[in-house]
Amino acid sequence: MNIRKATLDDASAICNILNYYIENTIIAHETESVSETQSKQRISDIIDLGYLLFIGEIDGKIIGFCCTQPWNKGVVYETTAEESIFLDKDETGKGYGRQLLEHLLSHIDKTKIHILNATISLPNESSVRLHEKFGFRQVSQMKEIGRKFDQWLDIGCWQLILT
C-alpha cells in the first residue's frame, strides 16, 4: 500500500468510504451522509489547522484514510488531538489499518501533540485491538452517550501519551 498526504482531489473517495460507515454502522459518529463539497471543506480544515491527513492506495485506488484533528475546541487542549482511521469496507482485516496508524504515528510532531485520543463506538473489537497494539490504553467508557439507528451507543476513549 502506498501512503501519501491527502489533497482536495481525494474528497470524493474519502466521502465514499466515510459514507458507508455513516449509513450502515455505528462506527462513524454521524447520521447524515457527507457530500463531496463537505469532504473538501473537512480536508481543507484539517490541513489549514496543521493536522495530518493521509491516504492509503493500492494501484491508484484509494482504500482508506487516516487523520488527526482537534480533540476539543478549548485552547487548553491544543496539545491533544484525536485520530481517525477508515478503510474501504472491502479492505478491512488485511493489515491496512495498522499500516495507516503506524504511518500517522511516525509523522506526528511530538513537540506539538502530547496526547492522541481514539474515540471508539462500542462494540468495535477490531479498532480496540488495533489501537491497543500501538500502546493506546482505555481511559473512559461513557454508557449510552450517543444514539444511532434507534439504539443507545457506548463510546470508549483510548489514549496514547506521545511524550
Image (tube, rainbow, N blue to C red):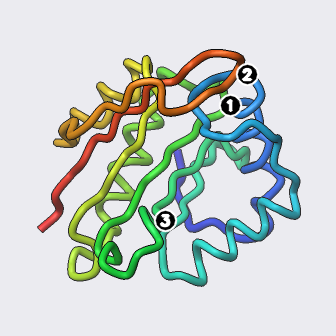
Element under label 3?
strand
Q: What residue would you read off at disc 3?
A: 69
Residue lying at 60% horizontally and 83% vertically, measured from the top left = 48
Q: Are marks 2 and 1 in contact (CB under 8 Å)?
A: yes
Q: Is 130 located above or below residue 159 in the figure?
A: above
Q: Is 62 located above or below residue 48 in the figure?
A: above
Residue lying at 46% horizontally and 62% vertically, measured from the top left = 68
Residue lying at 77% horizontally and 28% vertically, measured from the top left = 23
The kind of residue on which mark 3 rests is Gln
Element under label 2?
helix
Indicate the quadrant where residue 43 lies.
Answer: bottom right
Q: What residue would you read off at disc 2?
A: 24
The kind of residue on which mark 1 rests is Tyr
Mark 2 Cα within 10 Å, few/some/many (few <14, many 20+)?
few
Q: What residue would you read off at disc 1?
A: 21
Query: Residue 107 bears which disc, if any?
Result: none
